[in-house]
Every structure is written in structure tokens, then in C-alpha cells.
Image (spheres, coloured by chain):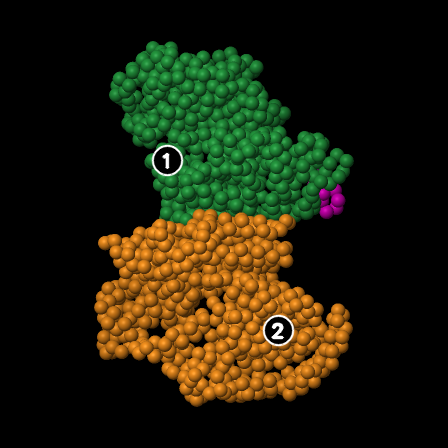
Chain colours: A green, B orange
Amino acid sequence: MTTTNQTIYWTLTDEAPSLATCSLLPIVRTFTKAAGIDVKISDISLAGRVLSAFPEKLTEEQKAEDGLSFLGALTQDPHANIIKLPNISASIPQLKACIAELQAEGCDIPNYPEAPQTEEDKAIQARYSKILGSAVNPVLREGNSDRRAPGAVKAYARKFPHSMGEWSKASRTHADYMRDGDFFSSEQSITMDQAGDVRLEFVDQAGNVEVKKELSLEQGEILDSMRMSCRALREFFEETMQDAKETGVMWSLHVKATMMKVSHPIVFGHAVTVFYKELFEKYGDLFEELGVNPNNGIGSVYDKISSLPTSKREEIEEAIHECLEHRPEMAMVDSVKGITNLHVPSDVIVDASMPAMIRNGGKMWGPDGKPKDTKAVMPESTYARIYQEMINFCKTNGAFDPTTMGTVPNVGLMAKKAEEYGSHDKTFEMMADGIMRVVTADGTVLMQHDVEKGDIWRACQTKDEPVRDWVKLAVTRARQSGMPAVFWLDHKRAHDRELIKKVNTYLQDHDTDGLDISIKTYNQAIRFSMDRMIRGNDTISVTGNVLRDYLTDLFPIMELGTSAKMLSVVPMLKGGGMYETGAGGSAPKHVQQVEEENHLRWDSLGEFLALAVSLEEMGIKENNKRASILAKTLDAATGKLLENNKSPSRKTGELDNRGSHFYLGMYWAQEVATQTEDPELAAHFAPLAKTLSDNEAQIVAELSAVQGKPAELGGYYHANRENVKKVMRPSETLNAALAALS
Amino acid sequence: MTTTNQTIYWTLTDEAPSLATCSLLPIVRTFTKAAGIDVKISDISLAGRVLSAFPEKLTEEQKAEDGLSFLGALTQDPHANIIKLPNISASIPQLKACIAELQAEGCDIPNYPEAPQTEEDKAIQARYSKILGSAVNPVLREGNSDRRAPGAVKAYARKFPHSMGEWSKASRTHADYMRDGDFFSSEQSITMDQAGDVRLEFVDQAGNVEVKKELSLEQGEILDSMRMSCRALREFFEETMQDAKETGVMWSLHVKATMMKVSHPIVFGHAVTVFYKELFEKYGDLFEELGVNPNNGIGSVYDKISSLPTSKREEIEEAIHECLEHRPEMAMVDSVKGITNLHVPSDVIVDASMPAMIRNGGKMWGPDGKPKDTKAVMPESTYARIYQEMINFCKTNGAFDPTTMGTVPNVGLMAKKAEEYGSHDKTFEMMADGIMRVVTADGTVLMQHDVEKGDIWRACQTKDEPVRDWVKLAVTRARQSGMPAVFWLDHKRAHDRELIKKVNTYLQDHDTDGLDISIKTYNQAIRFSMDRMIRGNDTISVTGNVLRDYLTDLFPIMELGTSAKMLSVVPMLKGGGMYETGAGGSAPKHVQQVEEENHLRWDSLGEFLALAVSLEEMGIKENNKRASILAKTLDAATGKLLENNKSPSRKTGELDNRGSHFYLGMYWAQEVATQTEDPELAAHFAPLAKTLSDNEAQIVAELSAVQGKPAELGGYYHANRENVKKVMRPSETLNAALAALS
């Protein structure tokens, strides 16, 4: 491993974040250099990953280092210090566009074979498949998760509160979920006494056994199995639709088909075929012929029938509209374009859509573009009930008040694909009635479920080491923050009962004296946290992997109006640290605005926050005093930036990402220059502080002068670095000031 | 005191219960005699109390013993064993009717002087005032309260569940209460280090001091003071009315003007004058002239304007209707008669109306006679929030299911007029702005509130001895039942903080090993209890005086459909016991049905249950084995009676109260005859069991033969005992069978 202990690895990703890096990094390096810290770029962009997959096809110049593999190995190094910016989780269309762009550049890489026939094509597809989807996080997230709203961000939200919709006490909005037949109600769970292999087997009614999967489990590993009844699910959907129709509320679906990429598209598909029951009854055969896949949404129908003769297409479109007459109004993703909740599965992501609705006074947008009360349908009850608890709370107490509310940071079990989030390769849709069972090598049946055709069965793994580390992280955070820490674990749930045993055991490894650490059911936990929150008190949520994901959207969206401003630290199992910036992902329209008007609205706040913690850790771990000073001063500078509202504006002509970077640099230099802990360092930065302050107007003018005209980046997925540098660093005055110090 | 240790005192009360006693007692005595127990009548009827107040006016024959004074003294006897049937809490019209009836009988008692001028009249009024209202309970309830659903009753409800309205998840119904300015938010509380006198003083803005009341407090006594802001109250009412209008739900008011007889009529009056704001603005002067008192409801307006000329009256009636146009629909007490929620304060008793609404799927009756969602307005937030918690719970989980739900018995702090229920003489409506304060004899200010004209200020006392006894009772009940016991105490409330200290201290006096005793806020407590309840688990609620009252309606109405079937034991501070029967009170229409059709639908189940516990206690305390056997066999007989549906029918011609008594006697005799613990006793009752069984058809026929014709009771308040006996014991076969054993 080629890393010195004084190196920060900064990921080069895609789209807006990668553009921003070009402007920010020179400023960052000006500071870190003074502390003897090297900030190295590691390319994990989509284009970079594609190129590094086909070295044999490329010239030496075209070749790219495999940044992801490098960082993956680095996660095992106790000195690892990685700043991870948002990257593209590539869909197939995105991958194809990237390939085309690289080919146009002259790279001799193969096309993506959608339906590979030859062995060669299969091999190519296999290489590409490692690049598709959420391919980066599983490699890098070699630890649990510590997410919190940094003090400066919280202070900003208190001073400049985001809008919150009013909650009516008479609101009809509610969450609806299955009471039986879902994963929750069928969950079984065991902990392995010793390491061993198990088989996941299907036994059909004739007694034939089919091995679906073999697993090697570690000692102390928890294995869950559970089943969602197809019949119960479809009945539930039908009931919710009828109830919404009768009571006059909108119907909306909230699943997580992107992340739960095997189970939830099936659930989504059932919603589509139940909602449009008559349609699928009438045209089922035709749809099959056409290749309609309801798991891809009703959009799939529109897509596939577009090839039909007009008269036939119109007939089907009419049938679609007839279905709507017996159905409740549906919540819209985009009422202007007529995109409903059931058009595309990736549009209704529960952890984003539910907080948005709650923040909006419990309303979603109706087909007429008006906000309306809704029945929020989340079939699986396991986590859905927390939303109903919050809805009840808001009906009773009104909307949350960002100016006074406390904060709920999260310590999340994430490492090694814990729980449902690692279940994809162990999730099966049943093709026949029978039994699904988990069997040891010697034939002992550990768990089993009766299943019916169409049921979804899955197994989830949770390794012991991550749990142990998660408990430790919870204790550490409780100690550091002085907040009560609540483990969200439900003794009525099989999996959680196993976890509770571990938590109680591993808590004994730590000094918890004077700490307020408790275990509560999800409902108790969220209620406890909310009761404290509205009184301005803070409470750490210590949760499993799914709740980690849900809560780190839910609470930040109430507290800060966005989850993008959260600090996301991954203290890795081997001792290193990864600092994630901005949960928001990258937005294509940001790049578009740069190309058209040379204005980048991307907010690098996440980078500022992550860098501060990265430096703080560097200071502690490597005993680098100057790193600690840089961390403290950077936090102060970020606070000033927020306070003075120097974040990027969305409007071309106003301060953008580049201007915001300048202000961060100026404030940071001022903070370092005026700190007294290290006079030498202060003296070193005094000239920069002065130059930047003196030239503030000039620099801002230079940065805004370039705006309003198109900018040439020379590529989308693989922009030309020289072009980008020219676009992102247009202020000669700023560049010169930074150069003067180096 | 003239009491042997083997005596049960059975109260003779009014109306239906007193008629029922005439039929039941001969049966009861047949059994108790065999155990050497005397059952003595003690007359606490309204007529009896009136007669005993004027002995000097009456002939020897007319004179009545002062049963209430006798029983009051008896409460101090550790051997006291009292069965208390429902009696009339006389309003002035009822008292006057009773006086007239007695006068017509020839009793020379004076009229009730409504506006006494002479000293003599004042003296008469003073004597009558002791008879008015809730005069009996404060004398007899010399202990805390232990209320529970007896096993037989719970089993009956599970087998024959009462109807429950469905709860829609989209229901708009909610509880609304003040968030500030109410008693809860202003409450202060102290515990007396030592006994001492305090003054409740009003200080006006010029500094003049008016002593409103002087109190002698005991050592360890808790004194609370609190204020409800008139301004905040009226603003709250206005907001709730506007909000209900806007959101399209009905508006309903829920107070407790009967019990909280000083503070709540004022609160009710504000609701009236805010709802009919324009009316009172326009006709305020005229109304004052006419003597309209809004605290008596809008009914008071209708009442007082009836004397006006038709044109004026119609003008005002039109103005009333105009008010309604700007106001939400109001929940109706009687939509057929047009009686709204604001007509009469005694019609909207929160502890009855809220459970009825919740049982009815959150709906109340609208002006059009249809059930509708409603905003249930309960200004004081202290206890109101439990209803919102239950409403949220029902929206989330659906209506409670009587066939599977657990039970929530209550241990209530009741003795010595604890808390708000003893506050009437310490409650004041402020006539000017200033300060209300509690001052010790030496001038130290213990508590004070800034007050404005119109505010309601009150002080509440809670003596130490009852608290200590209440804690003991809670531990005893937890031990006896094996249920978790939850003290409903809110650490955010000043009064409860004082109580929590005492509870924690006094719990140490008891062996609580193996018991599950906890302290929870009201919301936590009700949620905890409900979460257990829907899973079939039982939880003791240990509460203060008001919650005692509220919960012993709320849970029984969900569990049993009525609170009348609850067993209500008052283990008295001095060691005796009082057993209350049927919380339902007496109903005039029951007597009317007897007079017109000779059918008494009164259900004596409460008496059966109370008698069983009375006998059980007698068995334990006086070491009377036969009493214990009678208790057990009576419980079994009651279970059989419920099981076989031998409770009185409402329909004339079917089994009525008398027939139900016969069946109880028969089952009881059968149970005693077949028990093996006391063969001699079994043998003694075998003939009766046989006679009654053999003659079942004959007796039932005799009892139903008399029905359908008018019955002459010879009085309403003071019926003729001979007449009553003739009416209530018409079966010669039954009478002969009972006589044969004696």
C-alpha cells in the first residue's frame, strides 16, 4: 500500500462535484500543505471506472488507474483518510452514454451488450456489470455510519429556517401498511453458534429440492429469513385503494425499488397490476407479447404500446383511463407532465418522499396540481410505522419548528452489507407453492416458511464484527456528544431480538458510566426523540441499516430542509476514516447550467464539512497539531460562510460555486491568521488573508464576469481537464494569491 | 357505634335501585343468614335525607333515621362493610319535587327557599344545601378507589361483544386543547414541611389585599395553585371554531361542569359567548337585564327570552341563527330536539362523551342526525391529551376489539377530596387584574400568579395520608393481580413532581420484589397500556382523582360497552370497605316503565358483583369461612347468569329485574349446594336449589304474568314500601321457596 500517514484521498467523481473539485482543491491544498498533508486525487468517476476496466484496449495515454480498487484496498489501512464525493450510480442508459462519449474520444472500448450471446459478449457484460448501479459504496463503506448535522449547519437552519408546511389537526393523511403477511410478521432469525455453511432451499409440493443459494456464515453471524405473501400484498393494495376512494384521500405508494432492487420492484409491480386490474386482465396476453414489465411501472405499458397501430394504442390508453374511474386519485410525481406515482419505480423512494410529504404538512400533489391529503402506502410494516408515528405527532403538535427543534444524529449499522441491504442475492420470487428453508450442511433445518407462488422470500445477513463496532461507535458518540443514545430495536421482531442480545453483551465492553443508553422499539424511539426534539433536546438514534438510511433523510429534512448538509462519517472497521459529502447525489441539470450559462450552483458545503472532520481525525490519529488547527479554523470559516450567506445562488450572475469557494478560502485564511495556538502558521497565512480581503470585490467581479455565456467542458462523463480548469478557475487575482503562498 | 362485625350495610337509595333492592334483598338475606351475616338497610335516599333534616317537623311515624350520618361515622370503623347503590345527586328541581311529594303525604316540611331573605329561610336553605348535589359520595368515600372489570363481566364481553364503530385511518377527528395559558401551563405546587395555615390572597393593582380563603394544611400536604387565562381561553375557542369551520369538521365541547362545578361552568360560559359572539355583543345589555347566564348554556338565552314579546323573541332567535352561519357545525346532544353541545353545561361531560365518541369511530352526531368527524375541544390540556393519544392510536390500529382486548383496572387517589376534585371552595373568577398568591401566616409568599380580570384561579389540596394509602393499594393490587402497575404522573407537571417524590418514598415501605411498577407520563402510560391491551395484556392504571374518574369510564366503555359493570371498591383509610355498585346512576325512565307497564329493566349486576367482594372481604377480615364460600359461589352464579343471558331485557314482557334476581338465586343455590368445602352448607341449600330448579318455568311465568299493566308504587321519591313489595315480589312460588329456608 502506497500511502503515507499524512495523506488525504480526495475522490474525483462525476458531474457537478467533479467540476467543483477543480475549483476547491487548489484552495484546500494551499492550507493542507502548511500542515504537511498531501491531498491526493483518486479517480472513481464512471468514465474512469469504464476505462480502467479495459486497459488492454487503450493507449498508455488513455489508460486510467483503477481508483476504486485502490481505495477499496485502502479501507483496510488504519491510516486511511478518504473524502468521498457523490458519484453516479450508473443506470444502463447512463453507462451507454458514457461509453459512446469515450468511443467518440477515440477509446477503443466495446459497446455494452444488452443481450449477450457469445462468450466474449458475456465477459464484456460481466466487466460492465461491476460498474453499474451502486457499485462504489459497497466497496468503500467498510465501516458503520456516523451522520450528524454539524453545529454550523444547525445554527444556520435556526437563523434562516427553511419553509415548513402547516399541519392541520384534522388532516386525513396517514401511513398504511400490512398488518399480516408481510416480511415483519413472518421474520425468523438465528445466530450462528459457530461458522458453517447453509443452503437456502426450495422444496416443491412433490418434495423436490432446489438449492437456491449456498452461504458460508461466520461464527456469531445473524441470519434472518422472511416471506411476503403475494396474496396478502395484493389484497392489501386492493383494500387501500378502495379505502382511499371511499374516504376521499389520494393514494400514494412509497417503496425503495432502487436500493431494495430485487424485492421492491416486485412489490411495485403488484401495485401497478392491482391498480390497473381491469387493464391487465384484458390485455395481459398482449402485454406479455409486447414485453411489458409492470415492475417497471405503468410507464412500461406506455412505452411498449407506442409501437402498436394508433387505433390499438388508443384503445389501450382509453382502457387505462377507464381504470382510473374506479380508483382513488393518485399522488403525482409531476402533475404537469402527468407522471403518477406508479409510472416509474425509481420515482417513489420512501426515504425521500415521506419526509417531503411530512415537511409539506402531510400533503402530496394531486393530478390537478393541488396539494392534498394522502394515504401513504408502504406495504412492509417493519419501518413504515415510524412514519405514522410522526404523522400522528405532527397532527397533535403541529409542524416541527426548525428554529427551536433539537437534532437527531444517527449511528447506523452499515458495514459488510448488513441486514436487508445485503439481501439482494438472497431474495427470490416463488415460482410455485412449497417450502423455503435454511438448512445446515448436515441437513438440520434452521428456519422454514410455507410459501405460495408469487411470494417473495429473502434471507438477510448481519455479521458479528460490524455489530460489535456499531455498539462501540454508539458509546463513543454518546460520550463525545453528551446526548442520550437510543438503540432502535423492537423486541417483537425476530432479528432485533438477536441484535438486542449482542447489544447487551457488547455494551459491557465499554465504560457507559454516566451515559444515557437505552433500547426502545421503533415507535417508542421515534416518539421519545420527537418529544425531546420539540423541546430543543438532542438524541442519538442508533439503528440498523435501513433505518439509518431512512432517518438520515427524515430528521435532516425536518431540521435542515435537506439531508445534503449532513456530515457523514464512516469510521472504518480497520481504523481508517471515510468522510462522505452531500447525500444529494449529482444533478445533471447543474452541469447543463454550466454548459449553457457558465454558472455552477453546486453547493460544496458537504466537502467543507467532510474536510474539517478529515483534518480533525488526521490531527488526532497522526498527532498533527496543525491539522487540528486547520480543522477548527475551517469549521469556523464554514460557519461564517453560512452566517454571511455566501453559499451558491441558483441564479446565473449571482455568486456561484466558485465564488463560494473564494469566500471559504478568505474566511479560512482569516481564521488561521488570527488564531493564536500556532503563531508561525498564523503568520504564514496572514498575507493570504490580507490579499483575499483586500481583493474581495475584484475577485467576485472576475468570477461573475464569466457568467451568462456558454462554457465548453469538452465532455460530460469525461470532460477535458484543461477545459474544466479554465472554466472553474477564471479569477486571475485569486489564482495568483493562492500561487503566492505555495 | 352499633355494629357487629358480621354486618353488611346495604344502602337504600332512590328510583330503580331502591325498587330492585326490594326484590333482591330477601334472596341475599336467605344466603347470608346461613353464614351468620346480617344485612342491614341504611336509608340514604333523597326523601330520607330530607325527612331526617327536619325531625322537629315530623310525627314519630314520619321521622327518618339519618342514614348518611350513620354511615359517615361507620366509615371510621375498621369493620365497616357497606354496599353503596347509586343515588340521586339532587338538582334543585329534583329537590323541590321531592319536597312537594313529601308534603302531599302529610309531612310538614318547609319549601326550599330559592332566594332566602329571613334568617329562618336562610337556616332552611342551609339544611337543604347539605342535601343538594353530590352530597353522599364525599361523606362515604373515605378511602381511595379500586375499580376493575370482574372476570365474569370481562368473559361476557368477550363472548357477547358490544358494538364498536369502525375507525377510518383517514378520520379527521381529533382532540384540541390549549397549548398555553391553561391550568396545566401555570401550575405551581409545594409540599408542606410542617403543618401550617395559609391564606389565598388577591392583591389588586393598587396593592390592596383581599383574603379569599384561609386553609389549615397538614404536614406533608401538597398544595397546588394554577390559573387559566380568560384571554387565552377565549382566543383558543375562537381559533378552534375557525379551524373547524375551515377544515369542515364539527365542533364539540367536552368539559365537566357537573363535577368541576365552579371552574368548568365559567369555561363553558366563555365557549357560549365566543361561539355566539355577535349575539352577545348585540344583546348583552338586554340579556343581563333578563338574567341570562351563559354559564348555563345557550339554553339560558332561550329560556329567558321566552318572556319577551314574540317579535323581539323572534328577532333574537334570528340573530342566534345568523351566528351559526360563521360557525362550524356543532355536535348535537339530541339532534331530533335540536339540543346542541352548548345548550346545557351538564350535557357535555367529558368522561362520558369522549369514550362514547371514540367507541363510535370518532364520530358525534351532527345537526342533520348523521355521524360526523369532530374537533373535540377540551380547553384544559392536563388530561385532554390522553384522548388525542387514544384517537391517534385508533386511527393507526383501528377500533379496539372487545373479544380480544386486555383490561385496564384503576387504582385511584380519591380520599379526602384529593386534587382538583376538592378545589371548588378554592376556585375564584378574578374580578380585576392583579396577583393571586398563597401566603403563610408569617407572610412568606409560597406561590403566586399574575392574573387578569376574568381569569380563573384555583388551589388544590392533596393530603399525605391518602397518598401513602394509594401507593399501598397500588402495590397490593399489583401483587394480587400479577399485572404491571403504572403510576400516571407527568414530571413536566408541578403537582405530579411532588407526588412522584412521595411515590418513590412510599414504595420503599413495601415489598415490590417481582412486581412491575413504573412511573410514566400520561401519554406514555396510556400508550403503554393500549399497546398491551390490544395484545390481550392487562395493566393497572394508578392515577390521581380526575384521571381515576376519566379512565374508569374510558377503558370500561371500550372493554365492556359500559362503565356500569365495573366493580368499584373503596378500601377505606381506617380499614373498612365500601363496595359501590353501577356507576350508571339511576334513570327516571326505568321507574316510568314500571309505573306504566310493570317492567323494571334495571340491571342489578353491579349489586351482585359488589356483594361478592363484600362477602369475600367479610370472609377474610372476620375469618368467616362461609362468607368466603358464599362469595365464590355468588361469583360463579353471576358468571352463569351472564353466560346464559339472564340479565333484564329492556322489553316489557321479557325477563326483567325480578326474573334476573330469581335466576341469580337459583344459580347461587345450585353453586352452594354443589360445592364440597362445606357439606353442611351444601345440604342446607340443596332443597332451595331443587325447588327453584323444579319451579323455574312456574316462577318465570308468574314474574312475567304481572307485566304489561300499570303498577302503583305510591310515590316516586318516597314510594310506599308495601306497594313496592307487592310490585317487586309477585311470585308466590319464589317467595314461598325463600321463606321455606328461613
Tags 2 and 1 touching, CB below 8 Å: no
Badge 2 and badge 1 in a common chain:
no
Residue A295 on the magenta span: no
Vertical position of residue B11 compared to residue A432: above or below: below
Magenta residues span A202-211
Q: CA distance from mark 2 to mark 1?
A: 76 Å
Q: Quadrant of the C terminus of chain B?
A: bottom right
Residue picked out by circle 1 = A157
Residue A366 can be seen, yes or no = no
**In the image, B285: left or right of A75?**
left
Give the chain letter at badge 1: A
Q: Amino acid at mark 1?
A: Ala
Q: Position of residue B556 (x, y in %)?
A: 54, 63
Q: Position of residue B86 (x, y in %)?
A: 51, 73
Residue picked out by circle 2 = B4
Query: What is the crowding at mark 1: few (fewer than 14 residues within 10 Å), some, or many (at least 20)?
Result: some
**In the image, A668: left or right of A323?**
left
Instruction: Say which residue appears at 37% left-offset and 78% top-offset.
Output: B124
Q: Examine the residues drawn in magenta and state their main secondary structure.
A: strand
